[in-house]
Structure formats: C-alpha cells, structure tokens
Image (tube, grey):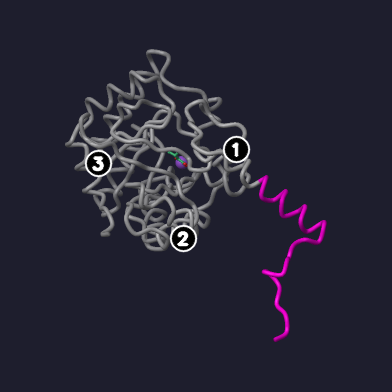
Amino acid sequence: MKRLTVPAIQRRKASGATGEPLVMLTAYTARQAQLLDPHCDMLLVGDSLGQVIYGLPSTLSVTLDMMCAHGAAVVRGSYHSVVIVDMPFGSYEGSPQQAFASASRIMAETGAAAVKLEGGQAMAETIAFLSQRGIPVMAHIGLTPQAVNALGGYGARGRSQEEHAKIVADGEAVQRAGAFAVVIEGVIEPIAIALTETLEIPTIGIGASARCDGQVLVTEDMLGMFERTPRFVKTYESLADVIGAAAARYAGEVRERSFPGPDQTYQPK
Ligand code: KIV
Ligand code: NA
C-alpha cells in the first residue's frame, strides 16, 4: 500500500460532511505504529509522549531530541499513514527562522511528512514561513496544552464570547497562513462545527465535535492505560487491567517456581 500524502489528506475536505472522516491516532513507537497504521490516515507523534512515555507533569519539557527519536521510530513502523510530528515547546515560538531550523531537523531526522505546532494568529507568520518552504504544517488551536500556564488548566475553551471569537479568528488565521489542516482541541461544540463549516482545510477534533472532518485521540488514553483521562476520551479497551493481570500471573508463577516450565527450558540431547 502506498503511503498517503499531505495533499491527499487535504483533498478529503472536499468530500465534506457526507465524506469519510479522517482517522488519526498518536503513536510513539515502531511497534505501536505497525499496529495502528492499517486503521489510520494519519499517525501523530504527539508531544503528549512527555506524559505518556516519560512521566513528565506536562508537555513543557519535551525536547527536539525526544521528538526526533520517536518520530523516526513511527516512520519506520508505518507504511500507509501520513506521519506528523509535534514541534515541542520552545523549539518554534521564538521566530519563523527558529521554527524552520527545528522543523527541518525533524523532517530530516524522522522522514515525517509534516509537523504540528500550537497557536493561531500568533503563529500565522511562522506557519506561512514553513509552508512556503516545503514544510507542511498542521495547526493546533483551542485548548493548547503547551500554554497550560497561561490558560490556567486543561478545561474546555471558548465559553466566553471573547474567547469564542478568538478561537474562530485563530482558525481563519492558520488557514490563511497555509496550514494544511487544523486540530481543534477542547472547545465548546458550536465553535468546532462553525469552523468545520467555514474553513476549507480539514478540521481534526479532539474534545470538539463528531462533525469535524476527522478525529484524533491519544492512543494510550483510548486503550485505557490511564486511570484519569479527560472527559472527551472514550476508552475502547482496558489495557491497564490486561497488563496488570498478566504481570500478576507471571509474578505468581515465578514465585512458585512453575515458570519457566519444560516448554521454556533447554535440555541436553
Ligand atoms: O500531543 C498530542 O497527542 C496532541 C493530540 C492530542 C492532538 O497534540
Ligand atoms: Na501535542
């Protein structure tokens, strides 16, 4: 199967509300990518790996080194999906030039097809700078986790009129700047619906609306690896229970010396 391309993703917007929604999940490792790839259109190497893989309290201390290492693993493990790598906090906000240096390193070291960055109007110049230089950009607006200290938490955005207007303006600005798609996270549903109707680029919702042009979730959230997840997560499997139960069985068999058994040991001929 040939790998999908960024223009192919963008064209899926043309199919509109009756078309087939775009499917995106996060992936951080090669094996995870292999398992998810056949079911997805896009794999996102999200900076959520800070919490999910590294146990960090937020995404703020995720580094370019981490994103490059995991991005390369996901590209190696996938054949079909478009791979998009998050630009980590501090690697792009300083200037369009800084963003280009970081994004080009991500593209060169991982083989990914695009980068994602957080921000709307404030990042428009940077999005234009990158996309005019051969780096497709997915924007991310609404609840932007890298701005948690400014936002004061991870609650849904857009409940005040002022914030509602700002998020709509952010969506319009990233489209004008040349973003090929936009993630809309944690906003009241009418904002997601309005942006999906008015924008010509695909909207990818997370905590947004089923009417978006596509959806994304953090894979480990969707698989039930964590006890506490945001309200917008639907748990499709309870992997934490499955893993815990397997570890308990292994531990029990080791302690009673029933593992390894005859099938797992070597004997002389
Ligand atoms: O880092 C991430 O996983 C993300 C998605 C949740 C959109 O940015
Ligand atoms: Na992210």
Q: Is residue 187 above or below residue 5?
A: above
Separation of residues labelled 2 and 1 (CA atoms):
23 Å
Q: Position of residue 140 (x, y in %)?
A: 38, 36
Which residue is disc 2 drawn over?
Answer: 73
Quadrant containing the C terminus in the rendered view: bottom right
Q: Is residue 5 magenta?
A: no
- Badge 1 crowding class, 10 Å Cα cut-off, few under 14, some 14 to 19, many 20 or more, is some
Task: Give the magenta range.
Answer: 244-269
Q: Is residue 257 magenta?
A: yes
Nearer to us: label 3 or label 2:
2
Residue position marked by numbered label 1 in the rendering = 226
The kind of residue tagged 3 is Gly
Mark 3–mark 1 Cα distance, whole angstroms, equals 36 Å
Q: Quadrant of the N terminus?
A: bottom left
* Quarter assignment of residue 165: top left
User: Is the CB–ligand 1 distance for label 3 below 8 Å?
Assistant: no
Q: Is residue 40 above or below residue 164?
A: below
